Amino acid sequence: MRSSDPKGASPLVLRLPAELRNIVYDYVFGNSIYPLAGSHERLTKDALALLYVNRQLYTETALLPYCTGTFASEALNILREFIDRRTPAQLQAINSIQLRTLNCQPLSTIEWIFTRQAFSCLKRMPGLSRVEIVDRTRVLIHEQNIKAIMSTYVRWVHFWVPNVVCVARDCEGLWQLEEG
């Protein structure tokens, strides 16, 4: 007779061959954006529910959100707090960061302006390969000024992490600057 205890049951996904499990994991975690809304917010369990099914799934998937996802922050201090809570393996696995601005300013009221020094937190992620700075200004009255400031941000990113691809763009897809 089978036990009705769900703890003793193996998830169906673990019965799949590794190649098929990898396809499932890519579907679940691939190209996800994980917003970092503040110091009290952690990665939501909904977004990472598969990690908590059992130990084997956790072992197989624990670093996948870091390798395949993008972590989006409205301020560098929020990103720094997130980085401070990561393990060395997680920091190594982080591949992509998105910084969100409005009129080239951080969206968070905690941090009023980006500085070159503020971007230094990026160097703590040795696996980082892409930084995207997205300005959410809807009306581009001063588009040239915004592009000039965003170009400065791109240079500051490259000052700290010279080998990353850095893209600065508006949220509407009207313009994009890319270096790296």
Image: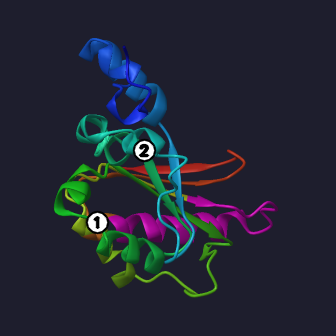
Q: Is 77 left or right of 113, judged from the image as shown?
A: left
Count of labels in the image: 2
Residue displayed at 28% across by 14% down: 19
Colour mapping used in the image: rainbow
Whether residue 180 appears in this view of the structure is no
The circle drawn on residue 107 is none
In magenta, the rendered stretch is 134-157
Of residues 81 and 12, the one drawn nearer to the viewer in this rendering: 12
Q: Is residue 111 above or below residue 8?
A: below
Amino acid carrying mark 2 in the image? Gly
**Image quarter in which the N terminus is found:** top left
Residue located beneath label 1 in the image: 86
Q: Is 10 left or right of 127, judged from the image as shown?
A: right
Is residue 138 rendered magenta in the image? Answer: yes
Is the C-beta separation of discs 2 and 1 under 8 Å? no
Amino acid carrying mark 1 in the image? Arg
Residue located beneath label 2 in the image: 69
Residue displayed at 57% across by 69% down: 37
Residue 56 percent coordinates (x, y): 24, 35
Residue 94 percent coordinates (x, y): 30, 52
Which secondary structure dominates the residues rendered in magenta?
A: helix
Quarter occupied by residue 120: bottom left
